[in-house]
């Protein structure tokens, strides 16, 4: 039953995504910078969308999401190593292989717990390009490694072996002075009666990842009911093509000055179903309040939750 429901959810989310793909609308896609990193001695590229620390969000120009810290204790994170006193890309401990729904690396998560690596006096700093190199340098007394409670949301988009299948375009610049970029489709949703736009990068369920063309990241399932997530409501039984998913919170505004502590890019999927499937032309459901009103009136049912988490950072949100 859970697998069937997850497949239905995936198909629904995919339809929302495909409805925008190829549309000649200015807001149907977004181009974002790619950040270079290292994994196992190889260069990889990721996008940087959120941070649980206000200072880091301000430094990176990402969205401040304090509740992402809750992902650490439940095991939904992987490890990122940031060298504090030598200029080099960050190192991560896992990447998808391949990128997309066929990923077999269960340790991968786009949620990275930040570890600070500091070179000690008396040693000549040099580039560290793998977790093994970091650990070896630590064991030799060359560096200290300090775990923080900071979590960043950095979905991997390019590895030496594959590229994110949902990308519209990827530009990797050989010139260090140029910025590598990725262009992704925007998915439209509703919040408080208004339109909101987000990107879709990972899912904790394989069937959802297959349907959406996103990366399968089973570690994200641990974020379910962890306090690190918010809710997204796909609506089943409303055939109106203008019906999109409803989310319960948005960053206000998008960026490091977000003041809404309830927002998270991690969405716990909560299915909404019409009791009478003949209500195909029902008016659009555009808010969580409307969902609850319809539930009270017996028009829709809400849940049960299948425990599916999708990583969908909001990149364009209305003003409250």
Image (spheres, rainbow, N blue to C red):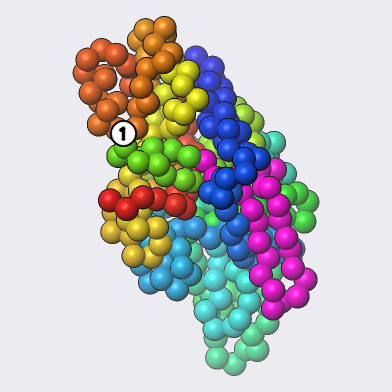
Q: Residue at x 64, y 53 (%)?
A: 183
Nearest the eye: 304 or 137: 304
Percent x, y for residue 271? Answer: 40, 24
The majority secondary structure of the magenta stretch comes to loop
Residue lying furthest bottom in this view? 122
Locate residue 291 relative to residue 62 in the image: left or right.
left
Nearest the eye: 153 or 320: 320
- Tally of marks: 1
Q: Residue at x 53, y 21 (%)?
A: 8
Percent x, y for residue 307? Answer: 43, 30
Percent x, y for residue 300? Answer: 32, 16
Does residue 66 appear anywhere in the picture?
A: no
Q: Quadrant of residue 51?
A: bottom left
Nearest the eye: 124 or 307: 307
Q: Residue at x 28, y 51 (%)?
A: 320
Q: Give the class, few, some or many, for how many residues have Cα within 10 Å of label 1's Cα (few <14, many ≥20).
A: many
Q: Quadrant of residue 302?
A: top left
- Residue marked by disc 1: 287
Percent x, y for residue 243? Answer: 44, 28
Does the magenta portion include 258? no
> What span is in magenta?
164-187
Q: Residue at x 35, y 27 (%)?
A: 285
Answer above or below: position of 72 versus 233: below
Q: Secondary structure at mark 1?
A: loop
Does residue 190 appear anywhere in the picture?
A: yes
């Amino acid at each position: 039953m859970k697998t069937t429901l997850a497949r239905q959810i995936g198909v629904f989310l995919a339809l929302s995504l495909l409805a925008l793909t190829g549309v000649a609308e200015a807001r149907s896609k977004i181009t974002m910078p790619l950040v270079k990193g290292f994994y196992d001695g190889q260069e990889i590229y990721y996008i940087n969308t959120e941070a649980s620390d206000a200072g880091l969000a301000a430094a990176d120009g990402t969205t401040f999401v304090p509740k992402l810290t809750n992902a650490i204790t439940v095991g939904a994170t992987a490890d990122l190593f940031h060298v504090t006193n030598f200029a080099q890309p960050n190192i991560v401990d896992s990447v998808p292989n391949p990128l997309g729904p066929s990923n077999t690396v269960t340790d991968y998560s786009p949620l990275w717990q930040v570890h600070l690596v500091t070179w000690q006096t008396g040693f000549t700093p040099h580039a560290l390009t793998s977790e093994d190199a970091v650990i070896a340098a630590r064991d030799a007394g060359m560096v200290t490694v300090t775990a923080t409670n900071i979590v960043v949301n950095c979905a991997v988009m390019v590895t030496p072996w594959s590229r994110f299948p949902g990308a519209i375009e990827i530009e990797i610049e050989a010139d260090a002075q140029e910025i590598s970029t990725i262009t992704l489709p925007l998915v439209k949703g509703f919040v408080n009666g208004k339109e909101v736009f987000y990107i879709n990068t990972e899912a904790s369920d394989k069937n959802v990842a297959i349907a959406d063309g996103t990366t399968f990241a089973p570690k994200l399932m641990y974020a379910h009911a962890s306090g690190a997530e918010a809710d997204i409501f796909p609506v089943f039984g409303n055939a109106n093509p203008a019906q999109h998913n409803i989310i319960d919170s948005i960053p206000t505004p998008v960026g490091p000055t977000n003041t809404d502590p309830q927002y998270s890019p991690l969405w716990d999927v909560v299915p909404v179903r019409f009791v009478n499937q003949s209500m195909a032309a029902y008016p659009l459901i555009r808010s969580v309040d409307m969902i609850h009103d319809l539930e009270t009136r017996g028009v829709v049912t809400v849940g049960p939750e299948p425990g599916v988490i999708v990583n969908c950072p909001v990149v364009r949100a209305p003003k409250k």
